[in-house]
Image (cartoon, grey):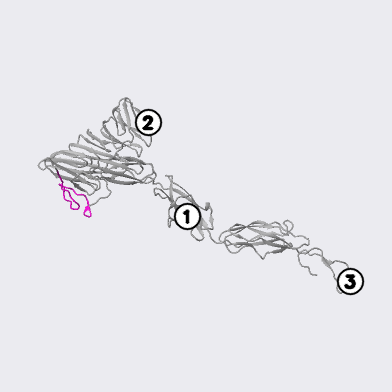
Amino acid sequence: MRVPFVVPDCPRRAPWGRFIPSILLGGCLAWSGSARGAVFDYSGSLPVTASFNPPTVTYSVVDQGQVRPGSTTVPTGNVFNGTRRDDVVAWNDGATVYLRFYDPARTNWIGTNIAGNPFSLASANGVVAWSAGGFVFSWAYDRARGQWVAAPAVPTGGASVTALHTTNGVVAWATSTGSIFYQAYDPATRSWAQAGTGGAATSFLTLADGVVAWVSGSGTGTRVYYRTYDAARHAWREGQHAPGLSVSTFLNAQGMVVWYVAGLQPRVHVRIYDPVRDAWQAAEQATAQTFNLAIVNATATWSANNVSFLGGYNAHAGVWTNGHTAPYAYFVASTNRGDAPLPVYFADMSLGGSAWNWSFGDNTVTNTRSPFHRFTVFTNTTARLTVTGLLPSHSASLTITNDITPPAGQIVIEGGLSLTTNRVVRLDVAATDNSGVVAEMRFSNTNNQSWGPWGPFATNATWSLDAGVGTRTVFAQFRDRSGNVSALTNDTIELDTTPLRRAFFNPTNISALEAAGQITLEVLLEAPFTRPVAVQYTSVNGSAAAGSDFEPAAGTLVFAPGQTNATFPFRILDDNAVELNETLTFELTVISNALASPPFTFAILDEDPPSVGFAATGYSVGETSGVAVIHVHLSAPSGRDVWV
């Protein structure tokens, strides 16, 4: 027969015995991603073998199909307390404590030696603790850091250590003076969190599933203490109760503390650290004389008067129930952001579980309760924990960002040209990322505003500049598969879409006398221009020949912005020969920023007069001829009209 507890239904909050309610929100129990007591595990991931044969200790592991051996010869020749537990090898030689751990990431054995002659050398879940010389020492190997980490030595104050426990990443001990100490290594803070308390003679010191609990005193002076480490808040969460009578039975298991107080009003007391509300939840049940008090699947069970009792806690609703504690999955990661390979310790903080199943989003799974995992892919993954028990399973997940380094890149406009006359330009793109893959890119004409859409990464792109004239800047950003966005990068170019001007010779300078000597010729732009213009002029033989009629001319003319004319000298060669007018041409070749005109013809006018005379010394005709033809001629063809 099973007798149900009195269970509150939200929002009534009826007590189960003397039920201590949780914090309410809006009249009903509410929860958020809060913390709970943590179970740590620093065990190795590969089975280790060890042999303790004084004076040498040998140890080995098979990693990636290769045997990785190690050995240590102790100076004293003695080997005591040799242990190989959870892949940590530890021993002492009467003067020194030796710790060894194989680190797969470093493919090497990592060891440390600590001076002292230990007592109660204990090792569990990768944590090693002992007492020596009036102090208690605790060490853990942190695979994320690749080193052994020591807790500050805790003095015993001259008392002896009567109990030393190491389990689930927590170390707890009692001293002969009744003091209790407890500490846990927190891989998120990379430090040991220590606490302690003094008191009368202590009994029932227990450490299980991340919970430290004990009883101090007797009779009306009895006190029950319970502690657990909150890995999310990085602090110990403490609770205590004064039952007023001596404790008959005291249990600590599966995150639950249960004790029985006999007497005229016997009671069962239950405590559990709420995984959601960051509080020790308490319940008491009046009962007859109790038998078979136990904790099964984080549920208190006992019998009285041949009646079975069952009571558990529901973290989903924040209430005690007459059934088993409901599975509630929750965990804390030492970090969820970093660059791969990213080492992460997971601390289980779940309730009501009998099995834990993890998947890490990279095709790896484990059923270790609080695993260590190294994420090697450069992308976001999801770590998911599913907790199963006697009631429906429950899951929790956490996004792990395995790439926090943004890409780096640059762009070059039009191959590095300083100026373009076309708004549509080519961008040459280069970018890198620690993952090896740059996924996307985008561009903007304004600093961090009006971005174009993200598009697939490519080594070149076409982009339109803002219209107008002046300096134009193109900004770029790059994004990797994890969503990391690069810092701004940019390049600049001058944009000028003003139409080009035509360059031509001044048409008023079309000729000159042969005797003019050096003259000045002028080249014009049809209108002012915004940029420098460069043209090259060259004389070309016509009927006039270079060297006999003129000196050859060639050169470059540069027009500054806004300038519309430029000149160059031209020398004509004079002679006494009577000849026709002669011509040559000038050609303009554009060097930059102009349109050329057709060749320009220039005339050299001869000014040497020919002699004029009759063709004969005399002429005679008949009187009846009517007309006489008289021939007059020049001594040479003339370049000008001759009148006589």
Q: Amino acid at mark 3?
A: Val
Q: Secondary structure at mark 1?
A: strand
* Label total for image: 3
Query: Contact, CB < 8 Å: mark 3 with mark 1?
Result: no
518 sits to left or right of 6? right
Residue 95 vertical position relative to residue 595 in the rendered view, above or below = above
Please say whether residue 629 is one of the residues in the magenta stretch: no
Which residue carries the number 2 mark? 67
* Mark seen at residue 621: 3
Which badge, 3 or 1, is on the more N-terminal residue? 1
Magenta span of residues? 2-28
Which badge, 2 or 1, is on the more N-terminal residue? 2
40 sits to left or right of 214? right
Query: Contact, CB < 8 Å: mark 2 with mark 3?
Result: no
Q: Quadrant of the N terminus?
A: top left
Distance from label 2 to label 1 (Cα)? 57 Å
Residue 414 vertical position relative to residue 247 in the rendered view, above or below = below
Which badge, 2 or 3, is on the more N-terminal residue? 2
The residue most toward the left is: 264
- State the predominant SS element of the stretch in magenta: loop
In x, y percent, where is residue 453? 43, 55
Q: Secondary structure at mark 2?
A: strand
In x, y percent, where is residue 254? 23, 40
Please say whether residue 7 is one of the residues in the magenta stretch: yes
In x, y percent, where is residue 200? 17, 38
Q: Amino acid at mark 1?
A: Val
Q: Quadrant of residue 146?
A: top left
Q: Amino acid at mark 2?
A: Val
Mark 3 Cα-neighbour bin, 10 Å: few <14, some 14–19, many ≥20: few
